[in-house]
Amino acid sequence: MTLLDDLKLLRADALALARRVAAVRAGGRGVDPSGAVEVMLGPDGWPDGVRLRPEWRGAVGPGGLAGAVREAWSAAALDRLGAWAAAATDPDGAACTQAEDGAPRGQAAHEGVDGPSPLPAALVGQAAGRDPGGRVTVEVSGGELVALCVDEGWARLADDREIGAVVRAALAEAFSEASGAVDGSAARGGTL
């Protein structure tokens, strides 16, 4: 084997490692069965966004919004965990691909690679959260969204983006509370 061959192997290993490190930063995306409600999770498992597509009122309506958000949340968590598992079991890092939007998919295989765990920081904490206006309340337990209530009268009239932002705010408050209950900090990204 020549020096050039060694360098080619080293380059291939470095590229595989770079894909794994990029995958560590991947979050998760999920949609409800109607496709009208989407939840995005960040690399730490915390909510990064909630998006309502224009057809959500006809597809799920204000009365079904809470259930649709919970279904989208579950799908996003499974997406994130599935990407992590694919990267963890792929010996050459090829599972660390990009999603349609260009975001890296997959997660680091082991704690030896710096980056977040595929599990949320609030894994064992239990807490409730609500938006400042009290229109949305949520409960999280064990890193899962277990309950979500939406003021249906407000949801009938509110702008889609406002609803998404308010749901995200309530989720963020609950995760912050749950994280604080677990590790004594109220800051995002606390450790267990």
Image: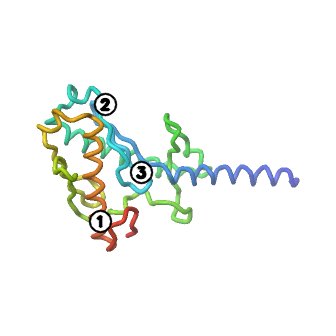
Q: Residue 53 bears which disc, if any?
A: 2
Q: Quadrant of the C terminus?
A: bottom left
Question: What amino acid does circle 2 point to?
Answer: Arg
Q: Position of residue 152 (x, y in %)?
A: 13, 38
Return the residue found at the far left. Answer: 153
Residue beneath label 3, please? 42
Measured in 3D between alpha carbons, the distance from the residue under mark 2 to the one under mark 3, in whole angstroms, is 20 Å
Is residue 147 visible to the viewer in this orientation of the structure?
Answer: no
Q: Give the answer, above or below, for where 27 lies relative to 154.
A: below
Residue 95 located left or right of residue 191: right
Q: Position of residue 34 (x, y in %)?
A: 27, 30
* Element on which disc 2 rests: loop
Residue beneath label 1, please? 124
Q: Nearer the viewer, residue 135 or 125?
A: 135
Residue at image location 19% in from the left, 48% down from the top: 136
Mark before the other along the chain sequence, 1 or 3: 3
Question: What amino acid does circle 1 point to?
Answer: Val
Question: What amino acid does circle 3 point to?
Answer: Gly
Q: Nearer the viewer, mark 1 or mark 3?
A: 3
Residue 23 located left or right of residue 166: right
* Element on which disc 1 rests: loop
Residue 105 located left or right of residue 73: right
Measured in 3D between alpha carbons, the distance from the residue under mark 1 to the one under mark 2, in whole angstroms, is 32 Å
Mark before the other along the chain sequence, 2 or 3: 3
Residue at image location 39% in from the left, 67% down from the top: 190
Measured in 3D between alpha carbons, the distance from the residue under mark 1 to the one under mark 3, in whole angstroms, is 18 Å
Q: Position of residue 36 (x, y in %)?
A: 29, 31
Q: Give the answer, above or below, for where 162 lies relative to 2.
A: above
Residue 122 located left or right of residue 16: left
Mark before the other along the chain sequence, 1 or 2: 2
* Element on which disc 3 rests: loop
Q: Position of residue 78 (x, y in %)?
A: 37, 47
